[in-house]
Image (spheres, rainbow, N blue to C red):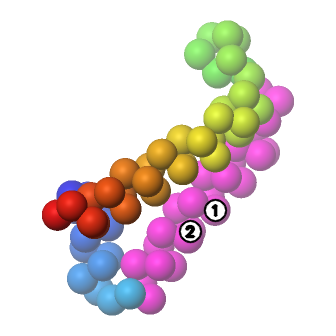
Amino acid sequence: MNPVMDFFLKLGPFQFILVKWFLTAFGLISLLVLKNYYLWQGRVRTVAVLVILPFLYLMLVSYEIYMMVHI
């Protein structure tokens, strides 16, 4: 479904996991560094995204598991 990650998956499982880990770590570190900044013209603090992010990630993982089981 994701052509970018499909490319890394074809390179091998180690490369795929390394890239997946790096992208997740980079995003989380970026949010932590910018936690006191405001988004969307000052309406939302970045820390609010950090609170919502685990739930969004859980939904993504649940969807991926659903796709693996039903396809």
Q: Residue at x 74, y 23 (%)?
A: 45
Q: Which mark is residue 22?
A: 2
The answer to whether residue 7 is left or right of residue 61 is left
Q: Which residue is mark 1?
A: 25
The answer to whether residue 33 is left or right of residue 40 is right
Disc 1 to disc 2: CB gap under 8 Å: yes
* Quadrant position of the C terminus in the picture: bottom left
Location of residue 27 with respect to 13 vertically, above or below: above
Q: Residue at x 25, y 73 (%)?
A: 7
* Quadrant position of the N terminus in the picture: bottom left
Q: Is residue 8 magenta?
A: no
Q: Residue at x 62, y 58 (%)?
A: 26
Residue 66: percent from left, percent from top: 32, 57
Q: Is residue 16 magenta?
A: yes
The alpha-carbon separation of the residues under discs 1 and 2 comes to: 5 Å
Q: Secondary structure at mark 1?
A: helix
The answer to whether residue 29 is left or right of residue 59 is right
* Magenta-tinted stretch: 14-37
Q: Nearer the viewer, residue 69 or 19?
A: 69
